[in-house]
Image (cartoon, helix red, strand yellow):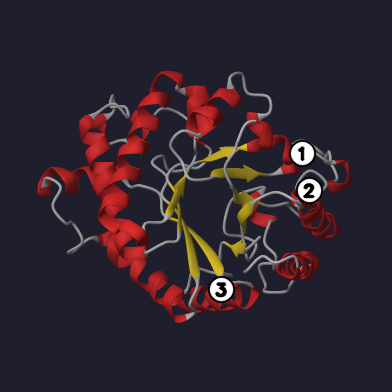
């Protein structure tokens, strides 16, 4: 099971971002970057260019240049997340759109075309090996059941376009589901099973502290029960455990990393992405999920994460 890190820096200065990628490269060969869609900008460019190559002068392209430079410099593999709905991942798609398009859904040709072109652009820029086109899509399906099938067909169109453009260099493509929500979501398993028809892997985001107080209380089949509904490899697109939330502690975080290794042993896991390298990049409870404190001091979970990577290497996985 290759391990992956989201290289959140101590601060967002260029020096600290550079250092975060350096540390991530020392801990493994994968990093994850989240680059959600800015719909106002994407729709404007689509309407202006009618689907032509929009790379020139793109502010999104310019923002990606330093990250792609660091990825190439450290010879890292990339797991890229391109969310069609920026955080918070709640509400309708229309609530994320410019006011002139606020009623649009994934059935809209404008949305489908603009999204397809933007994904093609970003695959060209970043050259990821894995690509998630919607994080926690079951949350969207729960709030917008009438638009979920429109998203699934949009995903299929975008995936086909990426495969046609990039051929053998096309990334593995999938969505993710929020595991703690899915277990109690009415119709949640049908959402997952519908996705199986179109995606290459099963993406999962998981934060078990939502359900249990301590890692030792996580049931033995907590993740393996997925296999009754999903017949494809797994990617843990987000996982973490806080050290300052609902009784969280640094010892508890380290214990979760160890427990995660036990719970996923024997599963076909392509990649497991820890949500943060350093504390402080996100709001609570994610702000204390880093493997380093905000001042750069490593937490005990860092040693547990290294041990997990090494143990899976010995089992025959290639990081």
Q: Quadrant of residue 46?
A: top left
Can residue 242 be seen by looking at this rendering? yes
Image mark for residue 53 = none
- Who's the residue at 68% across and 56% down the image? 289
Q: Residue at x 66, y 44 (%)?
A: 206
Pointer 2 or 3: first along the chain = 3
In this figure, which residue is indicated by the disc labeled 1? 222
Name the image quarter holding residue 313.
bottom right
Q: Please tell me which of labels 3 and 1 falls first in the chain.
A: 3
Which mark, by number, is residue 20? 3
Residue 202 location (% of width, % of height): 56, 42
Mark 2 highlights which residue?
Answer: 263
> Secondary structure under badge 1?
loop
Q: Image height check: is 64 above or below 256?
A: below
Left or right? Give the position of 106 relative to 228: left
How far across and down, in percent of the image, does residue 48 sit?
11, 47
Q: CA distance from mark 2 to mark 1?
A: 7 Å
Q: Residue at x 29, y 43 (%)?
A: 115
Image quarter (top left, top right, bottom left or bottom right) of the C terminus: bottom right
Residue 174 pos. (x, y %): 47, 44
Mark 2 touches mark 1? (CB < 8 Å): yes
């Amino acid at each position: 099971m290759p391990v992956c890190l989201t290289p959140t820096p101590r601060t967002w200065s260029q020096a600290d971002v550079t250092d975060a990628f350096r540390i991530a490269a020392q801990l493994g060969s994968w990093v994850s970057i989240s680059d959600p869609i800015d719909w106002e900008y994407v729709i404007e460019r689509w309407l202006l260019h009618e689907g032509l190559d929009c790379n020139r002068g793109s502010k999104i392209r310019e923002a990606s240049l330093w990250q792609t430079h660091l990825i190439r410099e450290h010879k890292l593999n990339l797991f890229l997340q391109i969310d069609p709905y920026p955080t918070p991942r709640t509400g309708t798609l229309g609530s994320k759109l410019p006011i002139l398009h606020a009623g649009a859904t994934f059935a809209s040709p404008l949305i489908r075309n603009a999204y397809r072109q933007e994904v093609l652009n970003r695959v060209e820029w970043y050259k990821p090996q894995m690509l998630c086109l919607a994080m926690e899509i079951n949350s969207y399906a729960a709030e917008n059941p009438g638009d979920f099938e429109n998203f699934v067909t949009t995903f299929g169109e975008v995936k086909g376009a990426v495969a046609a453009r990039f051929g053998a260099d096309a990334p593995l493509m999938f969505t993710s589901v929020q595991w703690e929500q899915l277990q109690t979501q009415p119709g949640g398993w049908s959402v997952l099973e519908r996705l199986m028809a179109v995606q290459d892997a099963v993406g999962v985001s998981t934060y078990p502290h939502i359900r249990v107080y301590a890692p030792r209380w996580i049931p033995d089949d907590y993740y393996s029960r997925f296999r009754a509904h999903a017949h494809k490899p797994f990617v843990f697109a987000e996982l973490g455990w806080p050290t300052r939330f609902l009784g969280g502690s640094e010892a508890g975080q380290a214990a979760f990393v160890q427990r995660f290794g036990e719970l996923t042993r024997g599963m076909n896991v392509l990649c497991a992405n820890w949500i943060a390298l350093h504390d402080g990049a996100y709001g609570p409870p994610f702000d204390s999920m880093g493997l380093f404190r905000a001042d750069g001091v490593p937490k005990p979970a860092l040693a547990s994460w290294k041990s997990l990577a090494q143990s899976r290497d010995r089992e025959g996985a290639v990081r």
